Amino acid sequence: MTIDYSHPFTPYKIQEDLMDAIYDTIENNYKIGIFESPTGTGKTLSIICSSMTWLRNYKRKHKYDEVKQDDSDEDEPQWVKNDYTSNILERSKSRIKDYEKYLDTLENELEQNVQTTHKLNAKSKRPKIKSEYNDEDFLPKNYQESEDIQDENSRIQNEINSLLGKINSDDVAVETEECPIRIFFTSRTHSQLNQFSHQLRLTKFHSSFDDVTERTKYLPFGSRKQLCINPKVRNVSKNDSNINDACIDLQGSKEGCEYLPKDYSNSSLMTRLSDLSLTKIHDIEELGDLGQQTKVCPYYSIRKGIEKTEIISLPYQMILQESTRLILNLDITDSIVIIDEAHNVLDVINALHSVSISRAEIELIIKSLKTYLGKFIKRLNSGNRINLMKLIKLCQLLTSFINEKEENVKSGEQIELDALFQGTNADLVNIHKLEAFLNETKIAYKIESYFEKTTEVETSSSNPLLFKIVKFLKCLTNPSKEGRLFWDKGPNGVVSMNYMLLDPSEVFRGIVTKARCVLLCGGTMEPMSDYVNYLFPYVAQSEIKKFSCGHIISKENLKVFPITSYRGLQFDFLFERRLNVNMLENLGEVVLKLCKSIPYGVVAFFPSYKYLDFVIKAWKDSTTKIYERLSNIKTVFQEPKETTSVEGVISEYSGLIHNREGALLLSVVGGKMSEGINFSDDLARGVIMIGLPYPNAYSGEIIAKRNFIESHTLAQGGSRSEATEASRNFYENICMRAVNQSIGRSIRHINDYSSIYLIDYRFEKVQIQNKLSGWVKERIETQHKDVDTLVQQIEEYFNSKLVGKQV
């Protein structure tokens, strides 16, 4: 059966295949779907069209099935049943029509208001908010440990008030049908979520009822940092944790927040804004603008619209952390959860439940706490004073522990929790109660805010240390059996204590169990085995659908060449052999020959910043003047380590290419160039991968993870050789995901063309090639060629592409 997916364009065959595969996964009750669709193949639109088409079809069928079930009385005559069915369906259709008309009215009102607002904005500038503060702003509320009972009484009273509020609610919104199932779309970055919103605008889907025009009901969820419209909160800090605590702190104050009604769960203002947000597809910035126009908090109002919403987009952490889902009232039961850019998901889950802290950081925390206590000791009540002193004591014990052990520690070596405070008086400090104090008083936010304003103690607004110690204490008080506390020693000799979640499958189980279906989608999902083994090993293979589609480009538009040697010397970039001077000389000569043959832009990827620096220095010091000769062929750019400088380098590089000049961009796997930037058309007619970017085998994280995998394999009845193989595979898969992510950025549309060069003898191994993305693997030139023959073939290839163009 051919399904009409309401695709806004004529889809390519591979897009149809992907849509069919996604629809089939949801319709046939697969629990998991893993989908790989290369960058540039219209993946996002395919996801939207297939999932929304299924949802609209399901809503129609669901309503008929629901009525049929209610109409199962065999004693009633058929005409009564038919009449009953018709009335119920007509009532549902009428509710949808009325709500759509209501949204039309709101949209018209909004358009008029926007025009008025634009006129006002043209006449007046937005006033600057004066950043004034006094000491009262930095004091926590009085804290007593017996407040647990008071808090419980307060919670019960709030629930009673909420119920009474619903009875007396001034909410006058038009009633509509609740969506029985929702789609949750999550991605890693703000720009990816905004792109999703913009792609969704291109679509228009058939209604769940005939003779009804039905909007796509969509809400973008975001953080307070993105959606808060109160300057008192927004100007507190650039840090999410500080902004969250500032918002909650303001709500609890006497003045409250002027944009948030006291009983916001029953406010017609909040309901109205949630309905306004459903009038059309808004991205997160536009939702913030709606809040500014209506003077109502968009962060809280969007929760009012969840039951009416068909599709919700949100960042990873909002869906992957159960505590966050509960706070936001996001119920994923029987819903479709789509995780985009899912090659990151294992790392993201681990990062959300992991923390690292060094002695220097703890010492700075102690200094901050002592300074704050000295300033405010006379104004803090006894509960706050005592707990701050306990926190200082605990931090001092942690520094003593590191001092005692740091000379003999090995990266990855496990720290037993019992040993952490052995032989000390730490038993006088109840860590659970200390954690409760930190959570209740928001003292970390108060202290961080104080030092941001006064700069008495150095602080980092991007990663406040006090929030780090809070997270570290949470790990100590709630250690997971899937986590480990271990030592790590950095390249500069700095010793840190790391808590890391080593098995993300249990955290992910909460999503898999509740959701109807979980779809993992990405441009580079190979190797797929890690997701099955480490994310949902408890799901039967029969409940997992895997799909990897080819590229939209023709086979002739991409050439892939492994280059294993030059001048009789093998390219072997293993850690212990990668500094070989002769090999680096040969590498330079090969890159030179490739740059002469490839027009316009070439992007080369190195395993690390440190190695890139080393290679550049070797080329500059070369007696054959490799770097100078390279610069004469193409302007050479190097990826900067500082994120703030990346945009300038890309802009300059792109400018040269657009002026029809040649440029070489030396980049790093895992850097900004390999993840967030797409090199379409002339920006990357050639992509060079130098070596295999294995992570540091001696880092504490890798050692701890590999030890865990080996122990887990043995515990499951595996042999020692199977345990070693599982560990080696995991390590290799990290590397190959990074390779696929980097080389997959050069093709962006059906008429694009490029070439890929894999420089290392290991790229000829079947085991490595099998872990490349399918569309790359199937284009590998299997016949071995020497470099000069290969260069001749490349020149012929690009000459055929550039007929009529000036190179």
Image (cartoon, helix red, strand yellow):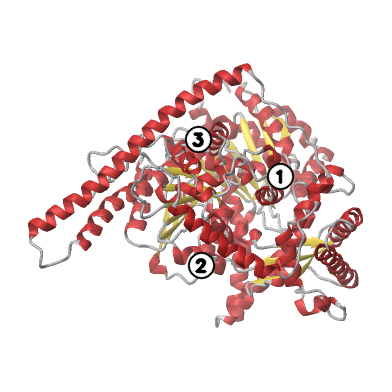
Q: Is residue 455 visible?
A: yes
Relative depth, front residue between 733 and 135:
135
Q: Upstream in the sequence, badge 1 or badge 3?
A: 1
Q: State whether residue 800 is above or below residue 709.
A: above
Q: Residue at x 51, y 34 (%)?
A: 797
The mark lying in front, picked from 1 and 2, is: 2
Distance CA(mark 3)–CA(mark 2): 41 Å
Displayed quadrant of residue 668: top right
x, y percentage for residue 542? 38, 68
The mark lying in front, picked from 3 and 2, is: 2
Q: Residue at x 65, y 63 (%)?
A: 353
Relative depth, front residue between 45 and 121:
121
Relative depth, front residue between 370 and 98:
98
The residue pinned by badge 2 equals 509
Q: Residue at x 76, y 49 (%)?
A: 611
The residue pinned by badge 3 equals 753
The disc label shown at residue 408, or none: none
The residue pinned by badge 1 equals 587
